[in-house]
Amino acid sequence: PGAVREALSRRQAAPMVGDGAANAEVSGSGRTSGERDRADAETVSGTVGTAERSISADVPPGLWQFARKKLREAYFHAARASVRDLELNPRPPRDEDRLAADPPDPEPGVLRALSAIRDLAREPVVPHDASPSADDDDETREEPGVPSKNADGVEAMKTTERTNAKRRRKATRAATVCARFDASTKAAARLARADWRAATALLLEDASFRAAEDGTAEDETSSRSRRAVLAHLERAAESERRAKWRTETITGRHSDLRRRAGQPEADSRKSFSGRDEEKSDVFVKDKNDVAERAWRCATGVSADSKDAAHALAYAEAAEETGRKPWVTEALRWCHDFAVYFLQGGGAAELAVKAERRRFFEAFGKRMTDAEITATRDKFLNGHLGMDGDPGLVPFARRGASRVLSGEEKEKELSTRPRAHLLDVGSCWDYFRAFTEGDSNSAYEVVSLDLEPRTPNVFKCDFLELNIGDEGSKMTTEKTSTTTFLSSYPANRASVVVMSLVLSYLPNPFMRGEMVRRARQVLLDDGRGVLLIVTPHSTDRSYSNANRTNALAIWKKNIESLGFERAAYERMRSVHCVAFRTVGNGPGVDVGCRAPELPIAFDAKEREKPPA
């Protein structure tokens, strides 16, 4: 991996391919991007044969150049993403990783692929069927409030005419060679951008191509190119269908749970008090009970066959989504922060930062360097010490000192249990790769999920997990196919990770209860940290016009449980937040009521009728 990263750093010194000088550097040619594009408009490289020496009128030069640029950009983006994947997911480097670190120029393969795509676009197509199909869903979906086609009246006729007109326009656009060439090129570029192996299979030369060209067998070369492009386009179509299925499965599951948890509110209000009245504490408790019952019916052992099938499909879709780069980047952030907190002196540094803030608020001035050093030494020689490894041994009693002599420290270091990283909603057990075969890893992973996808993940609902007394043992129950996590001790975990978990829960109270339970199992007094990864849809932060203050409410309510926000980073598609424990905290009390953690879509599905 080190050699791969070093080679990648040399390539990343150049700007994105397609910007003139970068094109010249990558291809080894002295021509700029504009000069190469003009040359392509006049003549194409001899590797694609005599028949390809001029660009036909049905594919304009500008479209050809645009398609060529997109394929090249997708190729080099996939190369960078492959090397980045090696950094995010620790594993031995493969041959394609070494190739990605220094990718060869794909120009001959790009021209060959474009020629094959153009030939496929020229072929006659079957006339478009005017009847509705699955592909017409986006075009024919009617807007809310518009009468259906079966309704009486003029509005229904207008709706039908409008739908048919959209279908005809779509068929007309798809019937042209130019449109089919453009659509196929974009589909090929999307798959090449997402999959380095697919990009190399499509765009890089292999021995068979070179042998055919050396033998001047243009027909054989064209046939091989055609087969390669057809296979690539079929895989691209399947990839897009799979992505659509993932989106529908995940969003549908979320919407269904939120609707089922919130829909009975009006009935619950009347049945509990006998009359329709304003919300009260009693009603809120009853509403939360309704949400919990809906959750257990959908996810627990009493779930019917339909809910069980939906849960398995959701787990499969969640695993595929969890392996996407934007998720693994966030998970790697969690790992790096955990290592910094446990072995990099992060716990002591965060405590010093909090003390400096309190000092400034109390006295209106900053700490001196000597005061900062004295404060840091106090923490390192106290309960945040142990050579920078906080929280590896739970307190014998709350508030006990951990200042040890040299011999005592060496003895405890050799016998103490390792720090626990509790991965709630793990699904595919990302953090396990950092501990396998490494006896000096920063933590020991305890992963749990409603529907585990790997054998090392315990099957468990964290909301139902029995939290035992401090100092008790973690207990499990094993069956022929699954291992269940039955109980986990309080004040034991050094790190709790909740990645894309809180937004899955259908009720604000249930999200708060998850965090309260995390506070119970985390070590006290700054020795534990909660890491939360939640999508931008939590507060609609992807839209300045529609964003909410949900994260500000989360910060206030989570800190009320005995936390203090230690770090925040906005990443691609997700928020990453770290909360360290403060003192004992009210969240460790069994009778503590969990605060609500709202998200932007809490009330949206409750207004919809059941499907």
Image (cartoon, rainbow, N blue to C red):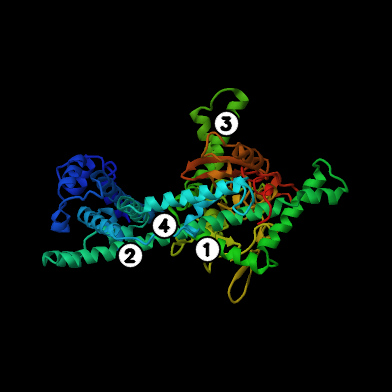
Of labels 4 and 2, earlier in sequence is: 4
What is the x, y in percent for residue 188? 33, 56
Measure how far apart labels 1 and 4 are at the Cα level: 19 Å
What's the residue type where badge 2 is placed?
Ala
Seen in the image, is 603 located left or right of residue 166? right
Question: Which residue has dot 4 on it?
Answer: 89
Residue drawn 52% across and 60% down?
Answer: 317
What's the residue type where badge 1 is placed?
Glu
Measure how far apart labels 2 and 1 are at the Cα level: 25 Å
Of labels 2 and 1, earlier in sequence is: 2
Question: Which residue has dot 1 on it?
Answer: 316
Measure how far apart labels 2 and 3 are at the Cα level: 60 Å
- Binning the other alpha carbons within 10 Å of mark 3 as few (below 14), some (14 to 19) or many (20 upward) gives some
What's the residue type where badge 3 is placed?
Arg
Measure how far apart labels 1 and 3 are at the Cα level: 45 Å
Of labels 3 and 4, earlier in sequence is: 4
The one nearer the camera, 14 or 127, is 127
- Binning the other alpha carbons within 10 Å of mark 4 as few (below 14), some (14 to 19) or many (20 upward) gives some
Q: Which marked residue is nearer to the observer: mark 2 or mark 1?
A: 2
Residue 466 seen in the figure:
no
Q: Which marked residue is nearer to the observer: mark 1 or mark 4?
A: 1
Q: Which marked residue is nearer to the observer: mark 2 or mark 3?
A: 2
What is the x, y in percent for residue 542? 51, 40
Question: Which residue has dot 3 on it?
Answer: 357
Question: Which residue has dot 2 on it?
Answer: 231
Of labels 1 and 3, earlier in sequence is: 1
What's the residue type where badge 4 is placed?
Asn
